[in-house]
Image: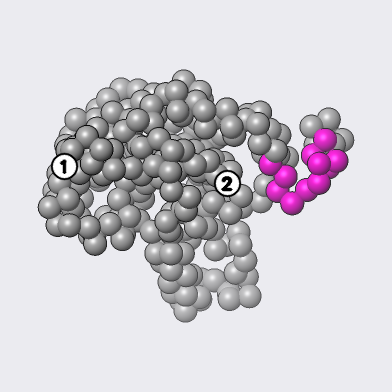
Amino acid sequence: MSTSIDDSQAVSGQVPRHVAIIMDGNNRWAKRRFMPGVAGHKAGVDAVRSVVETSMRHGVEVLTLFAFSSENWRRPQDEVRALMQLFVMALEREVRKLHRNNIRLQVMGDVTGFSPRLQTLIRDAEELTAQNSAMTLVIAANYGGQWDIAQAAQKIALDVQAGKLAAADINEQVFHRYTWLHELPPPDLLIRTGGEMRISNFMLWQTAYSEFYFSDAYWPDFKEDEYNKALAAFADRTRRFGRTDDQLEDVKQGV
């Protein structure tokens, strides 16, 4: 896949092909209810189901959810253990539902950092759903955007060293092929819940031309209505990709 932008992507009012979401606010949601933080993460699973279902109804092709960053290992060990247990439970309970709905599951990140059991569940889930075509659900786990770029650079260096690639041939398109999700369209819309306005090391390479949407809703409250607000805001955006408004008008008219 090339990172170049085709003319159809410059037309506003469309459903995004790829939506990426930073699911933030679980702990604060729980704290407001005088509950332990893990209760917020458990409540967030319902929001995941809602967003997956809504994405399917709208015709979104790819949905990427930032579940656990490479920096999240710094959190209290009790919370990390609870998150890992929740990840195991979600895979055990939800994968067959995804499969029945023709949804492909991919996990993006360094899965070698997880327990052997969790790695097996991830591998089995990806194999089971590999041929599904209704939508691709990507779970970013033990993932960081800087790590993604660094591991791509390392692979490129090894291929140059092995004589498989010439250094002079490295450009944006070549580099892109070494990053995660290179075979999928880049995110059209990046959503962050929880009221924070930063991307926290998420898909730094892939979101170069993404539209950003920040919601004040905590992730457990980000259900269909809140998601529809984000999709409506995207539909109102004008995506220029370096062009002028006059050029975009020509694109729309097929000039």
The residue furthest top is 57
Q: Determine the image quadrant of residue 99.
A: top left
From the top left corner, tell me how far across and down residue 136 is, in percent.
42, 35
Q: Amino acid at mark 2?
A: Ser
Marking on residue 231: none
Q: Which residue appears at 46% of the width and 53% of the height? A: 199
Q: Which residue appears at 52% of the width and 28% of the height? A: 229
Q: Quadrant of the C terminus?
A: top right
Q: Is residue 180 left or right of residue 130?
A: right
From the top left corner, tell me how far across and down residue 213 is, in percent.
53, 41
Residue segment shown in magenta:
239-249
**Tag nearer the camera, 1 or 2:** 1
CA gap, disc 1 to disc 2? 34 Å
Marking on residue 36: 1
Residue where numbered disc 2 is placed: 210
Q: Eyeballing the image, is 204 above or below 117? A: below
Q: Determine the image quadrant of residue 195.
A: top left
Q: From the viewer's side, name the closer residue of 250 and 171.
A: 250
Q: Is residue 74 left or right of residue 145?
A: left
